Image: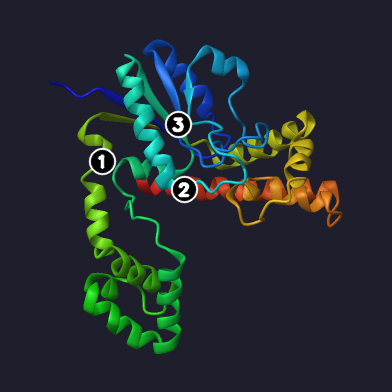
Amino acid sequence: MSKPPLYFIGGPTASGKTAAALALARPHSGVIINADAMQVYRGLPLLTALPSPEEKAEIPHALFEVFDAAERSSAGRWLTLARVAIEETVQAGRTPIVVGGTGMYFGALLGNLAEIPSIPDEVRASATALYDERGHEAFRALLAQRDPESATRIELNDRQRLIRAYEVVSYTGKTLGQWQAASAAHSIEKDFTVHRQLLMPDRAELYARCDARFLRMMELGALEEVRGLAARHLDADLPAMKILGVPELAAHLRGEISLAEAIAKAQQSTRNYAKRQMTWFRNQWGE
C-alpha cells in the first residue's frame, strides 16, 4: 500500500511561501500547517506576516497563533502539535502541507530532534556546579564514564554542551546519542511520502522584498502591535520578544533610538535572518 503524500514548503522569510502553499492547497484539498517559529505566537499578525483572514477562510490553516507571547514555544512542543495536525488532516481526507522557514521544525519531523524530557533546574544547577568545581578536563573525564561518545565528540572547550550531555545522562539514564537514535526511528517518512518544495529567490531580490515588506508592516500598524506587547512588560528573553522587528521598535518606544533607526535596524535584522535561513535550506535541502 502506498504511503500518503506530505508536502514541505520551505525557504527564507519573504520568499513567497504563503502564496506557494495556497497554490498547492487549492487543487489538493490541502491543509496548511505552520512550521514557522514566529507565527506560532498570537498578537503580532503584521510582524509575523500571518496569512490574511481571507486566506484562512479559503483554505484550512493549523498551528498558527497557538501560543501566547508569555509562553515559551520549542521545537519539541511544535513537533507534538504537528504530528497531531498531520494525522487529523489525513483522517479528514485532506492533504497536509507543512510550510515555514524554521529549519529545525522540518528536521524534527524527519527525526532530527532528540525528544529529551525537560531537565529539572536542580539537576542542571548540580551539573553546572560540578563543572565549575572540577574544571574542564576532570569534568570531561566524568562524562566519559557515562557517555563516552559525547565526551569524545563535543569540542574541547564547549562548556555548555558538555554540561548538557552530563545533565541528560544523569537525569534520564540515557546518553544524547541514545535519545537521538530513538528520535530518528520516528521520522515522518516512515508513514508518508515527503515532497519538498524549496523557495530560494535571488539574494538581492529577497533583501529588497524584506525591506519593502517591513515598510508595509509599519504602514499597517506594526508599531502599535509592539506598543501593545510592550505594555505587558514581559521578560525580554521570551521568544516572542525576539520576533523580527520587536526589539528594534520596542527600543524606539522606550526613547532609545529614533523611528528611522528602528526601521533600519529591523530591516537589517530581517536580512540577516533571511541569510541564515538560506544557508540552512541550501545545506539541508540543497538547490
Q: How is the image coloured?
A: rainbow
Q: Amino acid at mark 2?
A: Ser
Residue at the spot 44% in from the left edge and 77% down from the top edge: 128
User: Are there few (<14), some (14-19), or many (20+) residues within 10 Å of tag 3?
Assistant: many
Label 1 secondary element: loop
Label 2 secondary element: loop
Image mark count: 3
- In which quadrant is the C terminus drawn? top left
Residue 237 point in image, percent of width and height: 62, 57
Left or right of residue 226, residue 282 in this image: left
Residue at the spot 67% in from the left edge and 37% down from the top edge: 47
Give the distance between the C-alpha atoms of the residues marked 2 and 1, in whole angstroms: 18 Å
Question: N-terminal of the two: label 2 or label 3?
Answer: 2
In the rendered image, the vertical position of residue 26 relative to residue 254, given as above or below: above
Give the distance between the C-alpha atoms of the residues marked 2 and 3, in whole angstroms: 17 Å
The residue that disc 2 covers is 74
Give the distance between the C-alpha atoms of the residues marked 1 and 3, in whole angstroms: 17 Å
- Checking the image for residue 99, the label placed there is 3
**Which label sits in the foreground, 2 or 1?**
2
